[in-house]
Image (tube, helix red, strand yellow):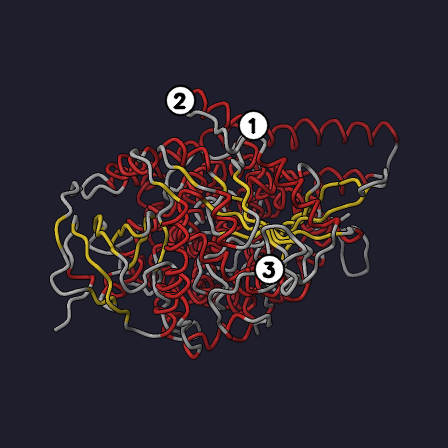
Amino acid sequence: MANTLNQVKPGCSCKVVNIGGNNILKNRLLYMGVTPGTVIEVVKVAPLGDPMELKIRNYTLSIRKKEAADIFIEDGSANNTGSEVI
Amino acid sequence: MADLAKYTIALAGNPNCGKTTLFNRLTKSNQKVGNWAGVTIEKKVGSYIKTKPGTQDKETVSVVDLPGIYSLTPYSEEEIIARNFIVDENPDLIIDIVDASNLERNLYLTFQLKKLGCPMIVALNMIDEVEQNGTMIDFRKMSEMLGLPVIPISAIEGKSFSAKAAKLMGCKSSKAAEGGVERLIEKANDILNHSYKYFKDDSEAIPASGPKETVSSESFEKKKFDPTLLKHADDIDYDEHSAEIYAEIEKITAATVREGEKHVQRERTQKIDGLLTNKWLGIPIFLAVMFVVFELSFTAGGLFTDLIDVFFNEYLAGVVGEWFTEAGTAAWMTDLVVSGIIAGVGGVLTFVPQIAILFMFLTLMEDTGYMSRVAFLLDRVFVKIGLSGKSFIPLILGFGCSVPAVMAARTLDNEMDRKTTIFITPFMSCGARLPIYALFVGAFFSAYYGLIMLFLYVLGILVAIGSAWLLKKTIFKGPSSPFIMELPPYRFPDLYTYIKHIWEKTRGFVIRAGTIIFLASVLIWFLQGYDFSFSAVENSADSILGVAGTAVAPIFEPLGFGDWRMTMSLFTGFIAKEAVVSTIEILYTPEDFETLFTPVIALAFMVFTLLYLPCMAAFATIKREFNSWKLAILAAAYQTVIAYIIAFIVYRVGLFAAGSGVLG
């Protein structure tokens, strides 16, 4: 099974390989800069467990885990960046 | 003003890029706020005057503030409006405001705008923030690579209060951005003077702005978007060129930006978020913030409310009454002005301070960036009833007044979520209903004040939740749109822009008090004082209102309010909820009140006033926001039917309980 963004732990970064899901989702993520090859850092998860806070292209983006499950990431690319987990 | 303008400039840019601040600086006080045709999205048009080169002639340049958007794809009304404005109205120039601290994503829109073929300038905003981190940007090179003039600016720089505050906080003003706005205007005027239109194939004509088509995409040729596309958004092929555009952008940033060592803003935002969206503290802090906002709005606003109430109902009514008597004005005229107009309009204006204060906090939460954190914190809760975290703010505002609450639903990007939220907002018990509860609880349930209040507020919330769930399953069914939301860096709002925001939101309310409420007050005054032959009546039961009330009363018989005066006070409640109380006080003698109302009827009556159709001002706002009479009437009918059913249940259960001796 391919790795997806929703499995990445807070404080870890990963590299986007591809985006699945419907065209609306795909297009909106793409124009917000979630393109293949982009590095995404998972900053934290909201107190109630969803949505996620991501750092991408020098800004902060929030998406639900449901959307994150459509973002495929490079195998084994999830690694701890050493940044503080809040 | 704007219609006679010789030139038109369109301001485009991402949300949170400082567009409004720049718009305010360009156009100062020459602004007009309206709506874009057919939608409720705010349209701001302003203008400035320039001199025709070589002459003394003045020319007007109109500046249109396009909605803040991330892209020109047809996924939201904002995106369609922005794109169609550029295609249909052919502005003479686009000023694209780019947040230099968030360069890559902002430049994406720049690339799309460029493809529309209008003359364009890139205003690189927030240069001061970037420089603070030691980041260097090669503007000349960027301009060359983009094929567009690039001018570094800092929109808040200058004499503004915020600029001074920023300096006090240790921010250095930026050398590169110094005089940037002036240079931007100069450059804009220069392009306008040469009247370059569609210089697509005329790269020599404008220095450093010739087209460099690096990415070609048929989907972004100069063509209009059909608004109906929104309904079929999923059928649109995704733009395969997004990745190519970003690759192009990365090339530009790699060649022109040298990242500094520091991350002042990022670290500040991270620190604040460490508290505000903290796993344990985030939600408690949010609840505390909401408590303070409400407490202050109601107590501080309440002080003004009392003052305004005294001013209108005691001072003004007294003074005007005396004037009229001295001047020998007819008694009916005095009565009309004093008990009709002053009481009616004054009654509505008393709520303006509370609304203004509530908006003060709300706008502050919005302009600093906290609002999107609230949506982030609460999204999970709202997903359960088919809404999104962004629905929270309109609903919480509903406890104050439905009018600003319904307007606040504009922040929802999913059309179905927005409509559902508007539909259920009136179930949040608004401040104007408090006097009704106060009257009945005081008379019948004084020992259970807190309990009855809690019951009413919770009932409203439960009905709202149930209705949201039902609506999302039926008429507002639709694919839930993905939740993709930027969490912008925390920033100080520009004071001028901030005050302007509050004023724009409060103004509409004041205007309504002077128009609709004014006319309605006159009408009600007439209806309860005159009969069908237009002669004044002694007993209001013989008035038009009395006769009509008696005719309609049987409908409300099953709920226990078969007396025409109860029915009619519900009708005047449509003018304003607090009018229910004043109508009851005018129409009933204390003895009648105590014999005709029983505790069970009082409870059913309160439940009905909690849930039935909102007041006229709220209804008018709902109609405007839906942009549909049909939906607005449907909402009002739904609310009234729900009120009828639940009040009926309360009355019958109450009667049963009273009969079996459980109650009273």
Q: Residue B170: which disc? A: 2
The reply to whether residue B516 is in sight is: yes
Snapshot quadrant of residue B58: top right
Q: Residue B624: which disc? A: 3
Q: Earlier in the sequence, mark 3 or mark 1?
A: 1
Q: In this view, does B470 lie to the left or right of B222?
A: left
Label 2 crowd (10 A; few <14 / some 14-19 / many >=20)? few
Q: Where is residue B621 in the image (x, y as percent from the top left)?
A: 58, 56
Q: Distance between the residues labelled 1 and 2?
A: 16 Å
Q: In this view, does B204 lie to the left or right of B142?
A: right
For marks 3 and 2, give the one nearer the viewer: 2
Which one is in front, B107 or B537?
B107
Q: Which residue lies furthest to the bottom in this view?
A: B235
The residue sitting at 30% across, 40% down in the picture is B286
Q: In this view, does A36 lie to the left or right of B300?
A: left
Q: Residue B160: which disc? A: 1
Which one is in front, B583 or B431?
B431
Q: Is residue A62 left or right of residue B644?
A: left
Q: Residue B72: which disc? A: none
Which residue type does callout 3 highlight?
Arg
